[in-house]
Amino acid sequence: MRDLVGDKGTAGVGLLNKAFQVLDQFTTDRPMWTQAELGEATGVSKSTINRLVRYFCDQGYLMQPSGKGPYGLGPAAVDLGLRASAQFDIGTMARPILERLARDTGETSLLAAYRSGQREAVYVVQIPGPGEGLRVFQSVGSSISLHAGAVAKAILAYLPEEIRNEIIDGPLERLTDTTITDPAVLAYDLAEIRTRGYAISREETYAGVYGIGAPVFGPGGAVVAGIAIAAPTFRMDSSTMLDHAQKVMTAAETVSARFGDTGAGL
C-alpha cells in the first residue's frame, strides 16, 4: 500500500488504520457496502473513504459486481485469504508428520510455506528436536530468503523457471561465510537438488548448522512449502545425512499427498 500512504510517521499509520477499518467491514454476514455506509460504520470522512475505496478497487481488493452501487471484496482480497488459509491448513496438517520426523531423526524439524509471487518463505511450524547438545531453533512467523538454507532451496529448486531465474540473478544476500552468492553456483546447486530430491545446507544461514530439506507440492503439482531438519554439523556425518535425507523426503511426500499433490513435481 506504498502508493496510498504518502504521509510519514503517525499520519501514515493513521491512514493505514483507516484502510483496515474499511476492509474489516466486509464480512460473511455483510459482504456488500456502499461508500456512505462505510463512512457511517467507521467514522472515516467521506473524502478519505472515497480515496481508499478507489485505491482498493484499482488494486483488486474491492470491486463493484454490477459496475455501480455497493462494493464487495475483489479477487486480490480473495487470493490473500486463500494464501493465508493454505499456510494455516498445511501447518496444522503437517504438524504430526513433523513431530514424527523430529523423533525419528533426533533433530529439529520445520516447515516453511512459500509466499506466492515473493522472493521468500515464512516459517509455519517448528518441532524442537529431542537430541542432546546444541539444538537449532527458527522463529515461527519469520521470513526467509529463498536462496539460502535447506528448506528455502528445496522450495526455490522447484519454482517455475522464470521465477527461479529471477531469484538466482540476485541480489543474493550473504548470511554467513558459506552462503552461496554466486548465481552460477546457486543454479548448479538447484539443479542437483532437483536430481536427488533434497537440498543440503552446510552453514549457509547459521554457523555450525547443517540442514536437509525437501519440497512439498500442492494441488496441480506446484511447490507450496518445504520441510527440513536442522542439526549441529558435528552430528551430521555422511551416513547419518543420507539416512536423514530419506526420512525428510518421506515426510515431505506424505505432506504433499495429504495436501493434494497430483504427482507432478515440476
Image: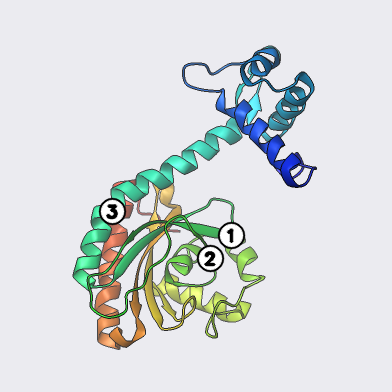
Q: Amino acid at mark 2?
A: Leu
User: Within 10 Å of the Cα at label 3, are there few (<14), some (14-19), or many (20+) other Cα atoms?
Assistant: some
Q: Where is residue 208 drawn, in percent x and y?
A: 41, 83
Question: Where is mark 3, residue-wise?
Answer: 95
Question: Could you tell me which residue is drawn at 53 percent across and 78 percent down?
Answer: 188
Q: Quadrant of the N terminus?
A: top right
Q: Which mark is residue 146?
A: 2
Residue tagged by mark 1?
A: 119
Tell me the kind of residue under disc 3. Answer: Arg
Q: CA distance from mark 3 to mark 1?
A: 25 Å
Q: SS class of the residue under badge 3?
A: helix
Determine whether 34 is above or below 136 in the image. Answer: above
Task: Report which quarter residue 151 is drawn in.
Answer: bottom left
Residue 56 or residue 225, whichever sits in front: 56
Compared to 48, does 102 lie above or below?
below
Does residue 3 lie above or below 238 as drawn? Answer: above
Label 2, secondary structure: give it. loop
Quadrant in the picture for residue 166: bottom right
